């Protein structure tokens, strides 16, 4: 059966061939296509060198030229085209800096991580499968190309990637592959945390995460990964897919009161902020007993964060993090309560700090912030109407300076 994305990309392969080069689809898109799954980005591998690719196509971006990767812009899409290559000596169990371009497809697929990822396919959907990847797809088996100990020794990220594919595809790990992981697991300490997180995000979002997480624990992988190595990860239970940032918030909420370690993950400030919000919300939720209290929490943290936490209730339950009773903490009620809240942030209050200063004839000071917070709470509680004269009346009665 044809696939629209491959059909769209066909002219690129044809063009390379017309110039005398070999070219194939390869990697995740071929794997997913053969599994009858939706495919996303298409990778093309070719015997043409980066310079030759640039000469053939009018619109290119040299995104990783020294490693052989050129982006070709064609019909409003962008395609990653990589020259057949083998890799230089591996240093410190990481991907090598240097690559060697070759003219032979076999050499290129031989350096790929797993048999299911080493299948090439031409524009007529003919498959070239030197390492029996199709058999392993059928058997639902994750197996390294070549000797697993050597392959994991060269690049320990492949261990994490293997567990990532196990989680996403719900495949089993070939015995030898698992043994190779066991023998080389310590080398993941040489990897950059950024590369690990790219794979972790996919691993923890995979449908079979319970099994992969169990394997990470069995392999003692966390002992070699910054941030995670400070916690007893056996105390964290993972039984359903969850977003990476929520995982980190869960670890923090359950195992530490210290935020300083977050820096070791080298994530963006926005991500740190999101984790902190989840963590604070989880803590606050543990004290909520009434709809009224919930209202303030929805105002302070927003409906979205509350709904996200709600949708992972099972994970929090399994980790003994108490959430409010389902009688008040359920989707319908959360949405209802959010709808009832008359203001959405402080700028919606019908009064300003300056109004307070003028009407109370006081000097500016920290009392303003406190007064505004109390006004805010009273409005959300429904005790006070968001209307300037009413607020000023209320302030004169309630605000002590
Ligand atoms: P996805 O569907 O998530 O994109 P993918 O298999 O395409 O999965 P990528 O990370 O996009 O994974 O890598 C593309 C291909 O490059 C892989 O299928 C594999 O053939 C090869 N590859 C990627 N990383 C490695 C690695 N560390 N060692 C060997 N081969 C690798
Ligand atoms: Mg890919």
Image (cartoon, rainbow, N blue to C red):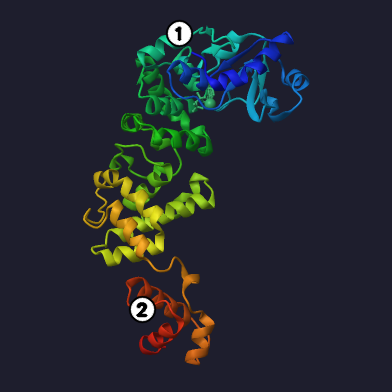
At horizontal 47% and vertical 31% (from top left) the residue drawn is: 188
Left or right, residue 110 beside residue 186: right
Residue 135 or 378: which is nearer the viewer?
A: 378
Do the residues under discs 2 and 1 have CB atoms within 8 angstroms?
Answer: no
Q: Which residue is mark 2?
A: 384
At horizontal 37% and vertical 19% (from top left) the residue drawn is: 179
Task: Give the x, y percent position of residue 3.
Answer: 52, 18
Residue 285 or 123: which is nearer the viewer?
A: 123
Left or right, residue 214 beside residue 2: left
Question: Considering the numbered disc 1 on the image, is that residue within a helix, a strand or a loop?
Answer: loop
Task: Give the x, y percent position of residue 130.
Answer: 51, 7
Looking at mark 1, is its residue's CB closer than 8 Å to ligand 1?
no
Q: Which residue is mark 1?
A: 132
At horizontal 45% and vertical 12% (from top left) the residue drawn is: 133
Which comes before the other along the chain, label 2 or label 1?
1
Residue 65 or 193: which is nearer the viewer?
A: 65
Whether 66 is drawn above or below 364: the answer is: above
At label 1, counting other C-alpha atoms closer than 10 Å, the crowd grade (few under 14, some 14-19, many 20 or more) is some
Task: Give the x, y percent position of residue 72.
Answer: 68, 26
Q: Which label lies toward us, 2 or 1?
A: 2
Whether 160 is drawn above or below 13: the answer is: below
Whether 361 is drawn above or below 93: the answer is: below
């Amino acid at each position: 059966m044809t696939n629209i994305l491959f059909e769209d990309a066909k002219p690129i392969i044809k063009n390379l061939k017309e110039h005398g080069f070999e070219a194939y689809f390869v990697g995740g898109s071929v794997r997913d296509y053969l599994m009858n799954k939706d495919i996303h980005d298409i990778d093309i591998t070719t015997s043409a060198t980066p310079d030759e690719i640039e000469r053939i196509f009018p619109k290119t971006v040299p995104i990783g030229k020294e490693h052989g990767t050129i982006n070709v812009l064609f019909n409003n899409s962008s395609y990653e085209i990589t020259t057949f290559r083998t890799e230089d000596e591996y240093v410190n169990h990481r991907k090598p800096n240097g690559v060697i371009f070759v003219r032979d497809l076999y050499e290129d697929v031989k350096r790929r991580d797993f048999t299911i990822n080493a299948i090439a396919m031409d524009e007529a959907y003919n498959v070239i499968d030197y390492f029996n990847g199709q058999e392993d797809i059928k058997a639902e088996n994750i197996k390294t190309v070549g000797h697993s100990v050597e392959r994991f020794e060269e690049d320990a990220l492949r261990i994490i990637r293997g567990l990532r594919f196990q989680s996403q595809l719900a495949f089993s790990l070939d015995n030898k592959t698992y043994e190779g992981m066991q023998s080389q697991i310590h080398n993941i300490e040489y990897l950059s945390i950024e590369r690990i997180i790219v794979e972790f995000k996919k691993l923890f979002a995979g449908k079979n995460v319970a099994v992969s997480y169990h394997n990470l624990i069995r392999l003692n992988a966390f002992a070699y990964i910054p941030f995670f190595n400070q916690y007893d990860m056996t105390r964290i239970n993972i039984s359903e897919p969850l977003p990476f940032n929520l995982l980190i918030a869960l670890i923090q909420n359950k195992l530490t009161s210290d935020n300083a370690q977050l820096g070791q993950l080298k994530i963006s400030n926005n991500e740190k902020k999101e984790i902190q919000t989840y963590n604070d919300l989880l803590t606050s939720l543990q004290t909520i007993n009434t709809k009224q209290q919930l209202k303030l929490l929805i105002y302070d943290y927003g409906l979205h964060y509350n709904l996200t936490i709600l949708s992972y209730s099972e994970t929090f339950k399994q980790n003994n993090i108490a959430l409010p009773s389902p009688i008040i903490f359920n989707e319908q009620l959360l949405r209802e309560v959010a709808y009832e809240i008359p203001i959405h942030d402080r700028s919606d209050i019908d009064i300003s700090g300056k109004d307070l200063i003028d009407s109370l004839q006081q000097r500016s000071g920290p009392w303003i912030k406190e007064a505004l917070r109390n006004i805010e709470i009273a409005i959300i509680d429904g005790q006070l109407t968001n209307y300037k004269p009413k607020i000023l009346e209320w302030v004169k009665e309630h605000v002590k300076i």
